Image (cartoon, coloured by chain):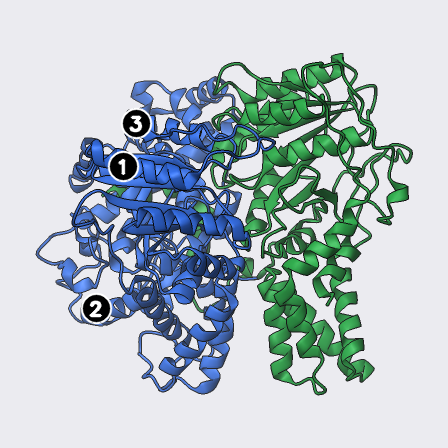
Chain colours: A green, B blue
Amino acid sequence: MELLLIAFLVPVLVGAGAVVALDRPVDEPQVKVLEPPAPEPVTVPAPVEAPTVEEEAVVEPEPELAPDPEPEVIAEPEVELEKPAPAAGRLARLRARLAKSNNVFSQGLLALLAQDDIDEDVWDEIEETLLISDLGADPALELVDRLKERVTVEGTRDPESVRAMLREELVAMVDPAMDRRLSATRKDDKPAVIMVVGVNGVGKTTTVGKLARVLVAEDREVVLGAADTFRAAAAEQLTTWGERVGVQTVRSEQEGADPASVAFSAVETGIAQEADVVLVDTAGRLHSKANLMEELGKVKRVAEKQAPVGEVLLVIDATTGQNGLAQAKVFTEAVNVTGIVLTKMDGTAKGGIVVAIQRQLGVPVKLIGLGEGADDLAPFEAEAFVDALIAS
Amino acid sequence: MFNTLTERLSSTFKNLRGKGRLTQADIDATAREIRRALLDADVAVPAVREFIAHVKERALGEEVSEALNPGQQVVKIVQNELEEILGGETRNIQLAKNPPTVIMLVGLQGAGKTTLAGKLSKHLKQQGHTPLLVAADLQRPNAVKQLEVNGERAGVPVFAPHPGVSSEHEDPTGDPVEVARAGLEEAKTRQHDIVIIDTAGRLGVDQELMQQASDIRAATNPDEVLFVIDAMIGQDAVATAQAFNEGVGFTGVVLSKMDGDARGGAALSVKYITGKPIMFASTGEGLDDFEVFHPDRMASRILDMGDVLSLIEQAERTIDKSQAEKMAQKFVDQEDFTLEDFLDQMQQLKKMGSMKKMLMMMPGAQGMRQQLEQFDDSQVNRIEAIIRSMTPYERNVPKIINGSRRARIAAGSGVHVSEVNTLLERFREAQKMMKRMAAGGGIPGMPGMPGGGAGGRRTHRKGKGKAKNRKQQRFGNPARAEAEARKEQERQAKKATQEIGSAFGAGADPKDFDPSQLNLPKGFEKYLK
C-alpha cells in the first residue's frame, strides 16, 4: 500500500519523459542507455602559479631539498611545541613501506613474469593481481590489454622488459604529469583555505592535524577550523593537534553547532591574523546522505563569503573498494574536490581505487598517509607509488 | 555503458533467446559479465574465481526455461548461489547458558565498532536483556567518551574505569585486558545478563594489538566475537578477515555502513574466506539503524538489482498508517486524488530520506536511470512550494486553476508559470492513470502488457504502471520473473477472469488473486493487502 503512494508520485516528479523511456520494448537496446554517461573530467582549477611558495610535490626525495623545518613558534608557553619532520624526506619512507605492505602484489607479479612463456593463464593472473590492488575491473582489463598488445607488437618475451612495460603503463595510468601541488599560499591578501572532507572513519581529523604539521614545517602560518561539530570530541582532538605545533584552533563551544558558522569564523580568524593557510576539518558523512552533502555545500559556500576555498581535499581510506569512485563523484558534485588524500596505507590494503578516481574524475591524489605517526603524511608521487608497487 | 548487471546481460544475450540449452559459449559470455559485476561490487578476487567456477559447473547443461533468456537464467543461478552462500546459516546471538553472555567486538579502525556497541546494546535491551557496555578501547582518542554517549542514548550503563586517551599524542595507558575482565566481574555482581566489550580498532598487520585482542578473548571467554567490517571495504577484506580470524578468531560478522551505496561484496568475501555467518547489518548513524542480515537482499544488492523489500520496510516504518489507508480507500472508491493528497504523500516520503535514492531503489529504476540521474531532490521542494502557493480549494479541485491563478501561484512560489503548468499536467496524467487502474482497466500507453516474462521485466515498467507491476512482476529477480512468466501464460489463457488490473495493489479483488502463487519473497504478503 505504501508503494502505491510512491507509485503515484513517480510520474509527477520524474515526469512524462520517464514514461516514454520505459515504454520501449525490452529487446531494443535503449539508445540513451548505450551512451556512456561521459564522466566529465572535472577541471581542477589550476593552482595559480606561485612557484616560490607553492608546496611542490616533491620531485626528488633528497633531504637536502627540504625547506627549513623550523616551525614558527607562537607564544603559547604552556605547551612545548614540537618540530615536525620536513615533508620532503618523507617519500623515501614511502618506498620502503609500500614495498612492505604490497608484498603479495609485487611478489606475485614477479613470479609470474619470471616465467619464460607468457600464456593466457599468466595474463589472467596478472589481471587478478591488479584487481587485488583495488584498481577496479575496467582499468585492470585495460592495462592487461595494452600490455598484451605491446608484448605482441614488440615481440618480446623477456620478463624483465614486460615488467618494465607494466611499470610504464602503470605510471602512465597514475599520470605523473598531474599537478599535485597543494594551494597553500596567500592569494589576494587572503589566506588559502583548505577544506577536508570524506566519509566516516577515514581519518579526516588526523589528516588535518598532520597537514597542519607539514605546513608548519614549511613555515606557513596556519589556523585550524573544527567544523566537525557532530562527532563527540572531534574538536578537542583537533585542538590537541594544533596545540602541539602552536597553531590556533577555531571551534564552537557547544556541540552540534552549525559547522558552516565555525568554518566562517575560522576563515575570519585566518584573515585577521594574516595566516597563510586556514584548514577546515568537517564531519564525516556518507555520500549517499543528500542532506549531509547539502550541509557540506553550505559549509563551503559560507566559508567562501570570507575567502575563496582554494582546495578541497577528499580523504579516502586505502581499504576502500570500488565505492570510492562513487564517493569521489558525489563529493565532487557537492564541493568540487580538488585533491585526494589516501590514508591508512600502512595496512595490507593497496589503495588502487585512487587510480580509478584520478582517471575518471581527473582529481589528482595529492597526499598519502603512511601510518599512525604524526609525520606520516607525505606528498604523493606517481613514479614512487608505482615503483613501490612493483618493486621486489 | 550499462549500469547494471541485468542491463549488461540483456545486451549480451539479446540474440540468444530461444536456445534449448545453455551452451558453454553462453555460459562463458555470461560468466565474464558476472565476474565483472562481482568485482565491481568488491567481492574478493579469490572468492570471485571460485564462485564463478562453481556457477559455471552448475549452469552447464541446464534446461533453458522458456521464460528466461540464457543470461537471465545464469543470473538466476548466480543469485540462488549467492543467497545460499550468504545465508547458509544465519543465526542470532547465542546466549550463554549461565549469564552473563559475553559479546566482544573486533575490527579495523573506523569500521564502526563503538557505534555498533551502542546499537547492539539497544537492540538487546529492547529484547528484555540488561546489557552492560565495557569500554576496552583505550587506544583511539575519545573512544571511551563516545561509548559513554552511545550508552546514555541507548539507556545502557557503561563500564569505563579508564578514561582512555583524548588525543593521538598521549600514549595509551591502562590495560584493556584488565578492563574487560573487571567489566565481566562488574556485570556478574550487578546482574547484567549481557556484556558487550568494545575493543580498539587495529590493522590486521599489527601484531601487538592483535595479541591484545586475543588476550581479551582469553580473559573473558566471550560467547560471541563479532567482527565488524565496513561494507565499503575493497579487496583488502580478504587479508583483514583472515588476519582477524587467525589472530583473534570470531564467531560472527557484522556489516557496517550499509546505508551507503556500496554494494558490499565484502560480505561474500568474508563468508567465503572464513565461513563465519553474517549476523547483522548496521545501516546508519542512529542507534536504531541496525537490522538482522538478510541474505536475499544482500544477494540482490551485490548484483545491483534493487532492493525493494528494504524500501517497503522503510516506507512502512515512516509512513503514517492511517494516511496510507485513507489513500487506499480513495483508490478503491475511485475518488480523485487531489494535490492535497499528493502533498501529504510527498511529505511522508521526504521523511524517508533522499527522494532520488528512493526512486532509484524502485524496481525498474534501471530503466529510468537516465531520468532519475537528472532528478534532483531540490525539485521536490519546488513542487512543494508550488502546491503550497495554491489555496486549499485549488488543491482539491485543480481544474479551476485558470491563467490568472497560475500566474499568482507562480509568483507565490517563485517559479515560472511553465513549471506550474508542467506540474498540473503531470498531475492530471497521474490522476487519470490512477483512476483507470482502479477501474481495473489496462494501463494507458502500455500496449500488450506482457505479464513479466523474460525481457519484459526490465523496461516496460514505467512510473505509471509501478504499483501494478509491483505485484505482477518480480523486479529483476529472475527466479521470480520465471515464476511470474509461468503465471502469465495461465493468466493470458483466462484473461477474462484474471484481469491484469485485478492483480493490482489496493484495488485487487482477493478472489482473483492469490499471492501465495506468486512466489513472492517471504513476508511480502502483508504488503499486498
SS at badge 3 = helix
Q: Residue B319, relative to residue B46: is it above or below?
A: above
Q: Is residue B463 visible?
A: no
**Total numbered badges shown on the rendered structure:** 3
**Distance (Cα) linking label 2 and label 3:** 38 Å
Seen at 79% across and 82% down, the residue is A158
Please name the amino acid that badge 1 sits on.
Glu
**Distance (Cα) linking label 1 and label 2:** 61 Å
| Closer-to-camera residue (A251/A169) | A251
Residue B487, label in figure: 2
| Occupied quadrant, residue A144 | bottom right
Same-subunit check for callouts 1 and 3: yes
How far from the left and from the top, in percent, is residue B392?
31, 19
Please name the amino acid that badge 2 sits on.
Lys
Q: Earlier in the sequence, mark 1 or mark 2?
A: 1
SS at badge 2 = helix
Q: Label 2: few (<14), some or many (≥20) within 10 Å?
A: some
Q: Chain of mark 3?
A: B
Q: Label 1: few (<14), some or many (≥20) within 10 Å?
A: some
The residue identified by callout 1 is B185
Same-subunit check for callouts 2 and 3: yes
Q: Earlier in the sequence, mark 1 or mark 3?
A: 1
Q: Earlier in the sequence, mark 2 or mark 3?
A: 3
**Distance (Cα) linking label 1 and label 3:** 59 Å
Which residue extends farthest left?
Answer: B511
| Closer-to-camera residue (A240/B319) | A240
Q: Chain of mark 1?
A: B
How far from the left and from the top, in percent, is residue A285?
51, 36
How far from the left and from the top, in percent, is residue A368?
69, 46
The residue identified by callout 3 is B340
Q: Chain of mark 2?
A: B
| Closer-to-camera residue (A106/B515) | A106
